[in-house]
Each structure stands twice: as structure tokens, then as C-alpha cells.
Amino acid sequence: MSDKVPNVVYKQEFFLPNYKDKTNQDKRNYYSSNKYDDYLKYVATGIKDLEKLDFVEYSNNSTKSSGIFNQNGLMSKEQIADFRKNLRETKSVIWSGIISFEEDFGKKWCCCYEQAYELVKNELPKYFKRAGLNPDNIEWFAGLHENTDNRHIHLLFFEKEPQRMRNKEKHFSRGYISNNAMDFLKANIELSATDFKAREKEIRLRLTKSVKERLSDVSGLKLKQMLLDLANQFPEQGHTFYDSDNMRKLKPNIDNISNYIISHNVDICIYKNDFDDLVSEKQKLIDSYCKRNGAPKPQQNLSEKYTKDLYRRLGNLVIVSAKSLKVQEIERLKLNAKYVVQKRMQKDKLWKELEHCMYLNSKCEYEAIKCFQDYMKKLEEMRIRTLIDEGYLSSDFEM
């Protein structure tokens, strides 16, 4: 890819309703399908001479066009007919654009309908917002043409309910859309086409998922203590998500925990390095794009922007984990306290039972001694009585 030739070029024009200039009105008639040899047919087939082609033929003519599509995919005959009807009746400004690709870039990154569809479907709504239009109020169609060295996508859109009016009167403003918005579309198309956004999402997802899994099972004492120390500093009221004002002072602590997790896990560390490499790659793409198109470089440092977003995501995971761990710790302490109380109660109960046993034992001993003494006394009485009976003792002997 050359730094001098843009990978993506976007050109656009617009056509006002009831325009007095005949040339412009003729163009609007062409783009609004008010002529037989109209723009919709051209996009569907990639050729202008359509006198002998019917709807099905030019909708499925794969030699020139991949067919007309909208946000839902390839359009059926009935859908195209409905679109043509709406296009003919609309009072909206009609915008027509062409996204053209550098030859090698187009062959690699926009070589089929599927790639063209994903590009346009994902990036067009963002462009509408940037242009000051409501994506939900826009009806559009597009078609990929492969009949030239430079593959290109034809695009047409209009407002379902015209909103671009001057003041409060029903005078339509001009359909001007800023160069800034169109540059935004070109840059996003290039980044999306090279699959950067998909790779960025995949790497970030792997990284955040791994951190989440690590936080779901906190076994290390140091990490556990770091999370508990953090949780103990949380404000009692207000929001506690990463970017909230309440948590501003705690951000360094939260980031420190994120860094600790990254540095103490080999897989997570690799994912973080992949993420950093991807950000560096995107910075080079942006620099190359700006150089080719003579556009100013973004004011915000890309690495700082993406790193800030990553640590926001990781930070919220850390906060959730710290909260959960604190709840678990409180429950654990409660259980421990309950266990201590139960053990104390059991000990007290055993002691009381022991005391009762000792009391019963002493009582038994006392009763046994008393019974023995009574027994010995009776034996003595019986011995003396026998001696009296035998005459050895007088009957008046006192026992």
C-alpha cells in the first residue's frame, strides 16, 4: 500500500426537491428513479444500457454487480420495488455517494458482497450520526461494482421524514455534509476493512475475560488483601463504577490491582502485549491515512485513549470483585463468630453437665457412707441384743 495513494476515496453529491435548475432536476429524476434508465438499475447491474433487462436479470447480474443491498442484506425484487416507490415519492434531499478503493486494497479487503455488506452496514450509521442525521430516519441502499480496476460501492440514501429544514418553516436546507464527516467515514471504512476493529474487539475480549476469570477465584493472599483493602475504602453512598466522581481518588489503587493481575499471569500478560501491539499498529494506520489524505492527526494520543478505555473495563471488573470479596469476608467472619459462640456454649454446657455429675457423685458418696454407717449401727445393735439374750449382758444394758 502506498502512502501517497489513498486506500479509500469517498465522493458524494446531493439533490434537492423541486430544484429550479433543470440540470439538477434531471439528475434528481435519475437518482430518484423517476426515469426508466435510472440510478437504481445502474447500481443493480453496473451498466447503463438496460433497455432489454428485466428486474430479475439485472438484480442477479453477477458479471458487473453483486446486487443491491441494505442493512438487512441483499434486497428482493419486492423490496427493490418498495424502495423505488419511496424514492420517487420522497420530499427529502437525496444523497448519492461512491466509496472507491485503491486497486490492491480493494481486491484484498473488499473482494465480494459479504465484505462490502459488512463494511457499509457497520459504518454507515456512524457516518449518519456524524453528519447530523438520524440513522433510524434514513433509508438507504448500496451495491458493490467490480467492473473496473478500482472496486467501488455505490450508495444512495434519503430521510424517511425530511428533517433538514431552515428555521421552523418547511424550506429544506441544502444537503451539505461536512468534509470532516466524510473523512470520518473514509477512515472508519479503511480500519474496518482491514479487520482492525474485529481484531481489537477479539483481543480486548480475551484480555478482559481472562482477568474476570482470575478475579472469580482469588486464591493468592496478596491479591485478596489488595481487593479487601480497596473495598474497605469504597464510599458508603453514591456510584462506585470506575469513572464515577466517588471513585476518582481510588483509580490509582484500582489500576495497581489491574497491573498486578496482568504482570502475575503469563496468558494475561501476553494478551496485554498483543493489545499494545494492536494499538501501535492502528497508530501507524492513522498516521499513514493522514499522510496520504493530507488530514490533520488526531489531537488525542491513540495509545492513551485505548489504554484508558481498557483500564476502565478492567477497573470495573476489579470493583465488582472487591465488592463480592468483601461480602464473602463479612459472611466468613460472621460464620467464624457464630462458630466461636457455639463452641463456647458447648463448653459451658459440658462444664455444667460435669458440675452436675460431680454433685451427683458427691451425693451418691454421701448416701453410700450414710447407708454403711446405718448398716454398721444395726449390726452393733443386733450383736448387743444377742449378747443380752445369751445372758452375757443384762437386759438394762444401754445400746
Image (cartoon, helix red, strand yellow):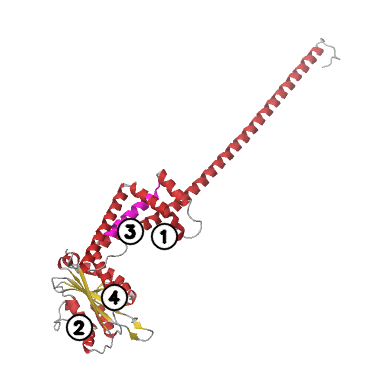
Identify the disc placed on residue 38.
2
What separation in Å lies between label 3 and label 1 (alpha carbons)?
A: 16 Å
* Residue type of the residue flagged with mark 3: Glu
Is residue 216 magenta-colored? yes
Residue at disc 3, secondary structure:
helix
Q: Earlier in the sequence, mark 2 or mark 3?
A: 2
Identify the disc placed on residue 243.
1
Residue on which the image places disc 4 = 178
Is residue 61 magenta-colored? no
Q: Earlier in the sequence, mark 3 or mark 1?
A: 1
Magenta stretch, residue numbers: 199-218
Q: Main secondary structure of the magenta part?
A: helix
Identify the disc placed on residue 304.
3
What separation in Å lies between label 1 and label 2 (alpha carbons)?
A: 52 Å
Q: Quick check: 32 above or below 203? A: below
Q: Which percent across, then down, holds residue 340? A: 55, 41
Q: Is residue 203 left or right of residue 47?
A: right
* Residue type of the residue flagged with mark 1: Asp
Residue under the point 84% across and 16% down: 398
